[in-house]
Amino acid sequence: MIELALSMGEKAFRGRQLFQWVHQKQAGSFDEMTNLSHQFREQLKSKFVLPAMTVFQKQISRKKDTIKYLFLLPDGNVIESVWMKYRYGNSVCVSSQVGCRMGCTFCASTLNGLTRNLTAGEMLSQVYEIQKDTGERVSHVIVMGMGEPLDNFASVVRFVRLLSDEKGICISQRNITVSTCGLTEAIRDLMREHLQISLAISLHAPNDEIRQKTMPVAKRYPIEEIFEVCREYVEQTGRRITFEYSMIAGVNDRKEHAEELSRRCKGLNCHVNLIPLNEVKERDCRRSGEAEIERFKSVLEKNHINVTVRREMGSDIDAACGQLRKNYLETS
Ligand code: SAH
């Protein structure tokens, strides 16, 4: 923002003040920025829009621990974000794209493909607007909303850096998680950024054959390669990797699948998060039964693999994993 201020004929410190207004105080309009000159504010107004998005609709779960926000962007697109209240703090699940082009057969976000990438500012705005609306500090951010974050690499990296900037909202990188369906080259690029974030991989299968049935990307990125890059990631960062595994009845939930997954995970500093599938009406994938989920979990435990079943939050307001969509207007 220093360059921006200079390019508009202002001094460098005006750029720093502007940064503080936008990222630390999360100003809702340029008029609030009272220490900037009227002329500078008018110039900014003619070039930029604040806030970058507005709350269009809000749904609160029965337990009041989850809120799904629908944001309207200036170009008419709509995105969804989710606020979740935990004992350890408040977490926001942000979208990284309008739609998604990965095509996973169980997920609503990809139903109509990709419309466009979100900018780093649009990802930040989701966090800022939610923090303002709830009046509570956001301590954790997960990039697990609509979109494939590593398909929008540069903006996501920029987002992480701004989110953790000590002059901004200052959320520790250790409290930021980026989830990917396993784009291995991009994971290697991410390693070169030397961020302190947590990485989650959407695995959903113990082998390529099953993975390819539900995840078209599995044809380009074999599971062997994904584990290879995960080992490199853990070695380089010293951080534990999370594998997300949505349990789909009759597809990936058998005992032998759990055994095969255990063999792959052995010796790797990882954690498996089992997600009871959230059924999406346009898709014919069904959720595994509770008994199958328990059996799967106990096989992993027997093999000393860290495993938890994800606590369901917000499924009554369609805010759970895989339920975020861009075309809610046509479907709700
Ligand atoms: N594209 C990224 C970010 C999405 S994160 C990724 O694939 O990781 C959302 C998580 O929810 C992913 O693990 C995704 O595979 C999972 N998911 C998608 N649809 C789901 C559904 N219907 N039920 C449960 N989990 C689902």
Image (cartoon, grey):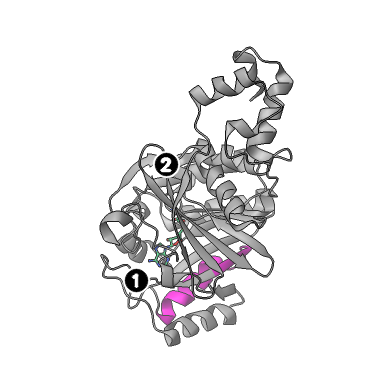
Where residue 174 appears, as percent x and y from the top left, is 68, 53
Residue where numbered disc 2 is placed: 73
Image coords of residue 316 (percent x, y): 42, 73
View quadrant of ligand 1: bottom left
Would you say residue 271 sits in the magenta stretch?
Answer: yes
Q: Which contiguous range is marked in magenta?
A: 254-272
Q: Between 26 and 322, which is closer to the camera in this rendering? A: 26
Question: Residue 59 falls in which quadrant of the image?
Answer: bottom left
Q: Is residue 186 above or below residue 229?
A: above
From mark 2 to mark 1, how far is it between C-alphas?
28 Å
Instruction: Say if the magenta span includes residue 94.
Output: no
Left of 103 or right of it: where is 121? right
Q: Is residue 231 visible?
A: no
Residue 279's tag is: 1
Q: Position of residue 251 (x, y in %)?
A: 33, 73
**Residue 63 rendering spot, x and y as whole percentages:** 53, 75
